[in-house]
Image: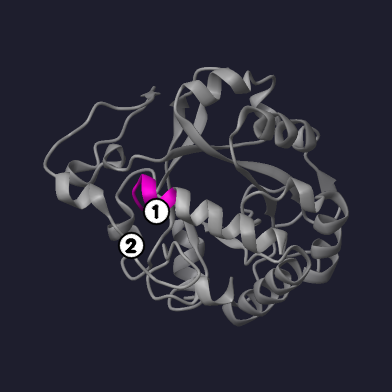
Amino acid sequence: MHRLLLCLLPLAMLLTSCTAGYDFMETKSIRPKARFHDTKPQDFGADHPQLHPIHGIDISKWQGDINWGTVKSSGVAFAFIKATEGKDIVDQRFLEYSQEARAAGIPSAPYHFYYFCSSPDEQADWFIRNVPKEAMRLPPVLDVEWNSESKTCRYRPDAATVRIQLQRFMDRLEAYYGMRPIIYTSVDFHRDNLVGYFQDYHFWVRSVAKHPKVTYADRRWAFWQYTSTGVIPGIKGPTDINVFAGNEKNWHNWVAAVTKQGNS
């Protein structure tokens, strides 16, 4: 896995090579029909997310009851599922969602919302205690944002401290699960702490107003969260929708590679 993720292109799909067949670039001028309805769609211009064939969702308990069979048949290819937060919060529906996604044939990854009021070891211990290895089809995700609206933790350490803590947390998860974590982040947090760092990690970036090439100019990204107002058959209410950066072949090769690594 280490070799896989040290490739300069973050979408290296095989353990022995680094290839990125971005087939959407070849049809950039053709605007395909949107795969999912969006109640507040954004015009991203020529680089719209519909050029990417692989779409997925990220969810938490707030999505309520989910018909995973309908979600699968609608075209959803993957799911990021909230598992834990800080050192003492578990999403009440994580295990249910994880098991049902797996039964429906949707590969999923658990994510952890990081709090800077707890140590990285406390949070890694909590995540490991609550996320069984069998729930790990895709690499675990570290969700790092400024907690500006938190009622319990709004602490903002300096950038060097942030990076030290995140590295420690991710090292713990990689050692336990055998897969290098994916980093999810927002524009402001990335600007304040992450620019130029963690180049050998996959990034999942939030950018709902502009294309990531504008908001994350020097960052290679693997996943792009492009809306929080999507409509997914089988889920009531607005849902975050994401795209994978590569083509369909890239996707299947990458899932096969990380699954093999996690099982080794």
| Nearer-the-camera pick, 189 or 89 | 89
Name the residue nearer the viewer: 153 or 176. Answer: 176
Residue 53 location (% of width, % of height): 34, 39
Report the residue marked by disc 1: 250
Mark number, residue 103: none
Applied colour scheme: one colour
Q: Is residue 27 left or right of residue 195?
A: left
Vertical arrangement, residue 122 with respect to residue 63, above or below: below
Disc 1 residue type (three-letter) = Asn
What quarter of the picture does the C terminus occupy? bottom right
Q: Which residue is mark 2?
A: 20
Point 72% across, 70% down: residue: 169
Report the amino acid beneath label 2.
Ala
In space, the residues marked 2 and 1 are separated at their CA atoms by 7 Å
Q: Quick check: 31 above or below 215?
A: above
Write down the region rendered in magenta: 246-251
Residue 82: x and y in percent read 68, 43
Q: Position of residue 61 (x, y in %)?
A: 71, 31
